[in-house]
């Protein structure tokens, strides 16, 4: 669908460009989603989309992150009562599985919705490099890299709409996306100044566990005048990330020697609370007046350090140690 919209281009890797610029903000029903752009395109089925709005000159009520413009995906409202849903399963080789399911239940003044997703993938890579530096003496270098990667994730999004009356609607929803990445790399080096006189093997393993959560609520009031709308939004995001990386190095030629191991630890977290109220008032001459209030409070923390194993103790390596604590309030 996006590929068919003028000025919008979707690259094979999933990147979206608006008028040639990739700095695009994507909204779902006018609000920031917890999904990344790639997840939006894979987990929102085309049949659920009512229309797509391209905003090339966004007003002040939108964040300034998308300098190229805004793509607003408007989802269909389930008019018929009862239970409906769909499931999508993708299988790939080697080990590339993706499952998404959407459920919707509507009765009277209540509309309940839920999205469940999961993915499991493995990747195996082999890279070889051979080079020779010429001069007075030739210096050869040979490198062989084996790579094994594993990614998996779980996604859940559920909530409900309560139709107070035909003009007033209240929405409450929760989104959670949890991922785990495990990467392993083995590097074999052969190098020297007058031929191969030294060989080194390096084994690296990293593991990163991330969790993103978003709680959102919305109150919307419409009016007899078409396009006039009053909204109050409250959104609370909180995420955390924990990543470790371990490196073991061994000299295998001419003498087998174990070098000191190195590891890095990175811990991060963020909390973001946004409260925003807007009123959109169209006029007969096709102009629109938008006004509102917004408040945001955000805090970010991170702790990173590199350590080297000496005997049985771990000590900070080369003074690489950094802690960050940041907070801001915008009104």
Image (spheres, rainbow, N blue to C red):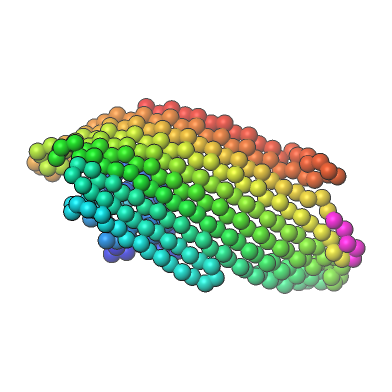
Side of 148 where 104 appears, left or right: left
Q: Please state the horizontal and vertical placement of residue 24, each as a whole percent of the image.
A: 37, 50
In the displayed structure, 256 sits above or below 226; it is below
* Residue that protrudes farthest toward the right in the picture: 255
For the point 44% across and 46% down, the residue is 176
In which quadrant of the rendered image does the C terminus lie? top left
Q: Please state the horizontal and vertical placement of residue 322, each as a whole percent of the image.
A: 65, 36
Side of 154 where 54 appears, left or right: left
The rendered magenta stretch, by its main secondary structure, is classed as loop
Examine the image and state in which quarter residue 175 appears.
Answer: top left
Front-most of 224 and 157?
A: 157
Residue 12 visible in the shown view: no
For the point 75% across and 49% down, the residue is 262
Q: Is residue 257 magenta?
A: yes
- Report the span colored magenta: 254-258
Side of 14 where 228 appears, left or right: left
Q: Please state the horizontal and vertical placement of residue 190, each as a whole percent of the image.
A: 79, 68
Front-most of 148 and 178?
A: 178
Side of 112 where 95 appears, left or right: right
In the displayed structure, 175 sits above or below 4; it is above
For the point 85% across and 72% down, the residue is 195
Q: Is residue 170 magenta?
A: no
Examine the image and state in which quarter residue 166 appears.
Answer: top left
In which quadrant of the rendered image does the N terminus lie? bottom left
């Amino acid at each position: 669908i996006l590929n068919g919209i003028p000025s919008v281009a979707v690259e094979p890797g999933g990147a979206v460009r608006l008028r040639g610029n990739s700095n695009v903000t994507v909204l779902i029903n006018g609000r920031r989603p917890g999904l990344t752009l790639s997840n939006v395109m894979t987990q929102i089925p085309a049949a659920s989309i009512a229309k797509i709005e391209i905003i090339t000159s966004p007003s002040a009520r939108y964040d300034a992150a998308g300098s190229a413009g805004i793509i607003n995906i408007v989802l269909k409202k389930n008019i018929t009562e009862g239970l409906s849903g769909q499931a999508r399963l993708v299988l790939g080789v080697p080990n590339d599985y993706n499952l998404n399911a959407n459920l919707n239940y509507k009765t009277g003044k209540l509309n309940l919705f839920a999205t469940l997703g999961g993915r499991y993938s493995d990747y195996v890579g082999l890279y070889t490099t051979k080079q020779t530096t010429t001069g007075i003496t030739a210096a050869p270098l040979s490198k062989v890299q084996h790579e094994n990667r594993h990614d998996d994730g779980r996604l859940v999004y559920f909530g409900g709409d309560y139709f107070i009356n035909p003009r007033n609607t209240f929405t409450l929803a929760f989104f959670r996306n949890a991922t785990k990445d495990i990467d392993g790399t083995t590097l074999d080096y052969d190098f020297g100044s007058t031929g191969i006189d030294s060989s080194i093997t390096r084994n690296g393993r990293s593991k990163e566990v991330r969790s993103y959560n978003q709680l959102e609520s919305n109150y919307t009031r419409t009016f007899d005048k078409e396009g006039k709308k009053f909204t109050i939004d409250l959104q609370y995001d909180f995420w955390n990330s924990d990543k470790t990386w371990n490196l073991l190095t061994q000299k295998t030629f001419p003498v087998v020697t174990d070098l000191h191991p190195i590891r890095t630890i990175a811990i991060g977290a963020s909390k973001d609370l946004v409260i925003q109220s807007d009123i959109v008032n169209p006029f007969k001459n096709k102009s629109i007046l938008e006004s509102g209030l917004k408040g945001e409070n955000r805090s970010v923390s991170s702790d990173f350090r590199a350590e080297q194993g000496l005997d049985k103790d771990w000590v900070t390596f080369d003074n690489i140690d950094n802690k960050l604590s940041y907070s801001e309030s915008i009104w």
